[in-house]
Image (cartoon, helix red, strand yellow):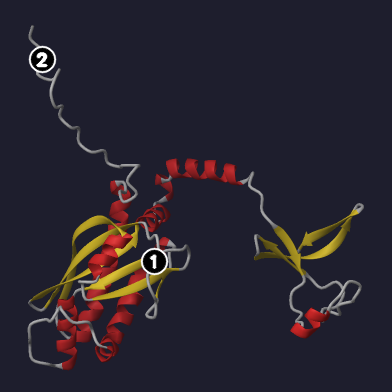
Amino acid sequence: MEFEDHALGPQPVPPAAEYQVCDPGELPSGQMARVRAIQETFLRAFAETLALRLETPVTAEIVSTEPLSGSEFLKSSDELGYLLTFEAERVRGQAFIALSAGLLAYLLRVLLEAPEAPADGSRAVTEIELHILREIFESLALEFAEAWKPSGIAFRWTPDAGEATAGLGTMLVFHCQLTLDNSQQFLHIAVPAFLARLAALESMPGAEEGAPGEVREIIFNALRRANLGVEAVLAGSTLRMKDLLAMERGHVLMLAQPVGSPLECRINGKPKFRGEWVAQSDRQALELL
């Protein structure tokens, strides 16, 4: 009996789908294009600023992109020269830019007007050298934050940051090449995959948001049933610690605020509204102002 060729044995593997839901480092091609555009905007602006600062032609381009775990990227960055850490202020997360040892050596040579010498990638950058490079780092941080601002995500450079936050998750790493005069150097941008996805969704035109809008409505419907802690707080008075320790049942605490002062309404501990205490039928209530 004969069998067709595809009945037994290894079967051909179908091409990978555009989006792998199980892989947090994968983005749909449309979203990836938007995030790449953000990075390209940053690179163009930084290259122009750097060219003015160094008085030499500078171009920059993304040469490759790959997903890496945060620990993998940080481990590899130990050999990349110097790492700048950025805190995301709209949501919690950290992004990084690693400058290669060769790029640092080139910048220092130009800034110090020193003769050309081979880069020594085996040593760490000194405090004096970091001070010399500070202005370039500041312009890099400014251009990075400006490029991401339209997406609604604010990044702030934290020069004195300690160790990176544990559990960084999957990062999208953009490997970039800078051509300075006739020298090719490198820097590497790592952004949390979830922030990249959020930025892409935020920048999508309204006409393309049919499916995400349906998803958001499902999320909102689920959140409407969630319980939140609500507090009415009369803020502004202070109390000495010794008076607090001396308080007992029956004591009267005199506050600085006059009767009828507005109260602060806090949701899960965060101030959201101001209001005043009123009577509602036979119960007390907070009327929002």
Which residue is under mark 2? Answer: 4
- The residue at 58%/42% (across/down) is 222
Residue 244 vs 168, above or below: the answer is: below
Which element carries disc 1, helix, strand or loop? strand
Residue 225 vs 254, above or below: the answer is: above
Which residue is under mark 1? Answer: 94
- The residue at 44%/41% (across/down) is 210
Question: In the rendered view of the protein, which quadrant contains the C terminus?
Answer: bottom right
Residue 240 can be seen, yes or no: no
Residue 162 can be seen, yes or no: yes
Q: Marks 1 and 2, Cα distance to the nearest angstrom?
A: 54 Å
Q: Where is residue 182 drawn, in percent x and y?
A: 7, 77
Instruction: Please rate how many residues cluster around mark 1, counting C-alpha atoms within 10 Å: few if below 14, some from 14 to 19, many from 20.
Output: many
Instruction: Please rate how many residues cluster around mark 2, counting C-alpha atoms within 10 Å: few if below 14, some from 14 to 19, many from 20.
Output: few
Q: How many marks?
A: 2
Q: Where is residue 190 drawn, in percent x and y?
A: 30, 64
Query: With 182 as the anchor, is 70 left or right in this view?
Result: right
Q: Quadrant of residue 39?
A: bottom left
Query: With 116 as the anchor, is 245 left or right in this view?
Result: right
Question: Is 206 or 229 nearer to us in this picture?
Answer: 229
Residue 109 vs 179, above or below: the answer is: below
Which element carries disc 2, helix, strand or loop? loop
